[in-house]
Image (cartoon, grey):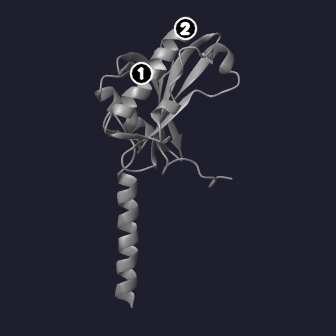
Amino acid sequence: MRKIYSIIVLLVASVTLFAQSDVTKFLGIPVDGSKPDMIRKLKEKGFVSSEYDKDILEGEFNGQDVFVGIGTNNNKVYRIMVADKNLNNETNIRIRFNILCRQFANNPKYIPVSENVNDYIIPENEDISYEIKNKRYQANFYQIPDPMKSVWFIIWEFHGEYRIHMYYDNLYNQANGEDL
């Protein structure tokens, strides 16, 4: 009986370890581990510390100049946030958002949460400056094959100009009320 119990415990532990080792990746780096390790790995990819904050990185991602922030929970990385460094006007942010939607939809590593990626596309005639007060421009994808490997992006408005914020989330490390 002890051997059976030991085998069951070992199987459960190995499945848990495997599940947490197959997490969301950003530039091939698992969104996991400590913040200093993540900063080091991102610097190896060419990012540099911002002059404003050593924990914020700057660099190029998908053809855009960006800031990269790292979110932690209990000293474990659970999120990489990528924000456009430059602000855009309404026309350019619509184009940028729609291009990102199509890039993710056409990338075999991702699957949209919505059944139809066109649900995310912003129509040409939509008044973003008006609608952003009432609606959230957001697109959600999963890195295949796991819905715990969440990647999503959103339009943020700042004094009438816009930028994309993109999030690579490791939902295994996210706060789940354990500190309440």
Q: Amino acid at mark 2?
A: Asn
Near mark 2 (Cα within 10 A), the count class, few <14, some 14-19 or many ≥20, is some
Picture quadrant of residue 109? top left
Disc tally is: 2
Q: Is residue 24 left or right of residue 154?
A: left
Q: Residue at x 40, y 83 (%)?
A: 5
Q: Is residue 102 above or below residue 84?
A: below
Residue 2 shows in this picture: yes
Q: Is residue 22 left or right of residue 79?
A: left
Helix, strand or loop for disc 2? loop
* Residue 146 on image: x %, y %: 41, 50
CA gap, disc 1 and disc 2: 15 Å
Residue 67 shows in this picture: no
**Quadrant (top left/top right/bottom left/bottom right) for the N terminus:** bottom left
Q: Is residue 177 left or right of residue 48?
A: right
Q: Which mark is residue 144?
A: none
Q: Residue at x 49, y 11 (%)?
A: 92
Between 71 and 108, the one lying in front of the other is 108
Q: Earlier in the sequence, mark 1 or mark 2?
A: 2
Q: Nearer the viewer, mark 1 or mark 2?
A: 1
* Residue 122 on image: x %, y %: 53, 22
Helix, strand or loop for disc 1? helix
Q: Amino acid at mark 1?
A: Ile
Near mark 1 (Cα within 10 A), the count class, few <14, some 14-19 or many ≥20, is few
Q: Is residue 114 above or below residue 120?
A: below
Q: Is residue 130 above or below residue 112?
A: above
> Can you identify the residue that label 1 sits on?
99
> Can you identify the residue that label 2 sits on?
89
